[in-house]
Amino acid sequence: MAYEKIWEEEPDNLNKDEIRKLEKDGLEILNDIEKYAAGGFDSIPKEDWSLFKWAGLYLQKPKEDGYFMMRVNIPSGLITNEQAEVLAGIGRDYGRDVIDITTRQAIQYHWLTIENLPDIFKRLESVGLSSIGACGDIPRTIMGNPLAGVDPNELIDTREIVEDVYRFFQRNSDFSNLPRKFKMSISGNVHNAGHDRINCMSFTPAVKVIDGEEVIGFHVKVGGGLSAKPYLAEELDVFVLPEKVKDVAIAITSIYRDYGYREKRHRARLKFLVADWGVEKFKEKLLEYTGELPAKGTCKLEEWNGGYFYGVHAQKQEGLSYVGFNVPVGRMNSDEWFDLARIARDYGNGEIRTCNSQNLVIPNVANEKVEALLQEPLFDRIKLEPKNFIGYSVSCTGIEYCNLALVETKERMRRVAEYLDEHVAVDVPVRIHMIGCPNACGQRQIADIGLQGVKMKNKDKKMVEAFEFYVGGTLEKEVAQFNNKLKGKIEADELAAALAAFLRFFEENKEPNEVFFDFYNRVGHDALQTALDDILETA
């Protein structure tokens, strides 16, 4: 393997994280957790702290206090009723009742201690769940279509494909030392529910005529990613049959393992390799691993839905509906999760689906039960038809728990969105994403308005929390682009009022039913910069 050759012949080229991983593979931390749980947090050598990522764990802020954040993999967002009960119980017993839905459809906890972990792992394993690989330099959970199997807008049901690929990479030591994290998306939904162009590797629905017959399969994109230097994934000229998805996924992951950069950690994601190689060279290398693949066929992606599924909708199964709800900034408590599990069981088949918009869906509800379901008190807060700002607001974890964040985000985004819903009236939703640092877990780059936390000196020359504005992001098929930065910073305490003024400019100058992205392209970046400049002058 290429990375082994670098280690043997040019060890000085490896960054310190690479050297540590070769000394102790990340998955080996799983063998130590029982021992550390018995000895307590002080028994964990500091050099092992980072290896807990392979078990799906980060030390939350401040690290020395010994509390862990945990992500639980939920491939494609599919949760059984038994799993939902276990997830609710972990939050109640160990996570201080905080349960978050992430932008990759995972479940996230806080406040876990090393002593808790053995029991948590047993509970997860008892219902087929795992946090292993949810963090670390390893294939992460697979993002996909939360409606898989019930979706009238899916070209192909991807449940078995996703499960097969996910299980292959779980605890697989052949792929536990990648240069950095590796994010996958597999979706058959024609509205791009899997956010194809921000993943390292994505499979999207396509068709191709083979031997005179139209065949359903996938196109493949590689090299997407966000963070401080974002890239949109590029499409390879290949068509992949459903039964070949796992082989191609293994091959692309192997290329990244064998040829990905390991000298500088900030340039180690697959996106940098793809950008340097180009898609033609990458395809040639892929075919060396897989053998010949057909050229691409016809893409079946239509307009992008942003990962939103609000309302009551007919499934492809006659007589059944799926019901989509807003979870404000993705945060729920344990009692709500227990109630959610009961409702899914009483009115549906018990399943719950999580969305990359930090929301949820209850599928398989008999049509005659829908009205009764909607009367459940839980849905006074977890709403079927949310207002235009709280319903389309996304937030990362923020400084409350994250060591990388510069500002508080989660609760702030909720408060700001509610303020906007009270003070601004627009006839279309506006997607607002807030992040606390450049790593962009809240996917700021694809939002209509991205808010990125920074520190700045205020008028009294004191360092305060503030936000930068980015505008015009989308993953629409033909015009996908990341949002662009506006000059200027807004103090956090003034953010709600400033954003309301900014959105009133949109409200007053937009055409009927014109969405923010179309408005941005019509009036131009400079017009929005002028609007923000006027706000900053009066702030």
Image: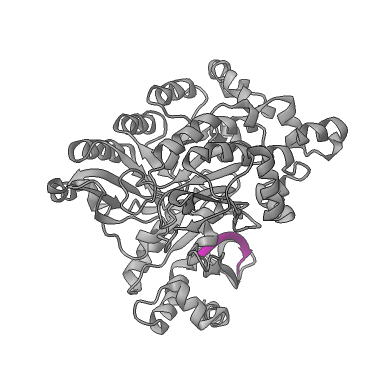
Q: Position of residue 156 (x, y in %)?
A: 39, 46
Of 537 and 52, nearer the camera is 52
| Residue segment shown in magenta | 450-458
Front position in the image: 375 or 62: 375
Against 355, residue 50 (above or below) is: above
Q: Is residue 227 left or right of residue 497?
A: right
Q: How many marks?
A: 0
- Asked whether residue 49 appears in the rendered view, the answer is no
Depth check: give the residue in front, 357 or 39.
357
Whole-percent x, y for residue 17 in the image: 73, 36
Q: Is residue 38 magenta?
A: no
Question: Which residue is more in the foreground, 223 or 530?
Answer: 223
The quadrant where residue 470 appears: bottom right
Q: Residue 520 location, x and y as percent?
A: 50, 76
Q: Residue at 63% across / 43% down in the picture? A: 292
Secondary structure mostly seen in the magenta stretch: strand
**4 above or below 249?**
above
Q: Residue at x 50, y 83 (%)?
A: 523
**Residue 72 drawn at (x, y percent):** 46, 35
The answer to whether residue 461 is visible is yes
Snapshot colouring:
one colour
Q: Is residue 317 rendered to the left or right of residue 470?
A: left
Give the quarter of the figure containing the N terminus.
top right
- Furthest residue toward front: 212
**Vertical arrangement, residue 36 with respect to residue 490, above or below:** above
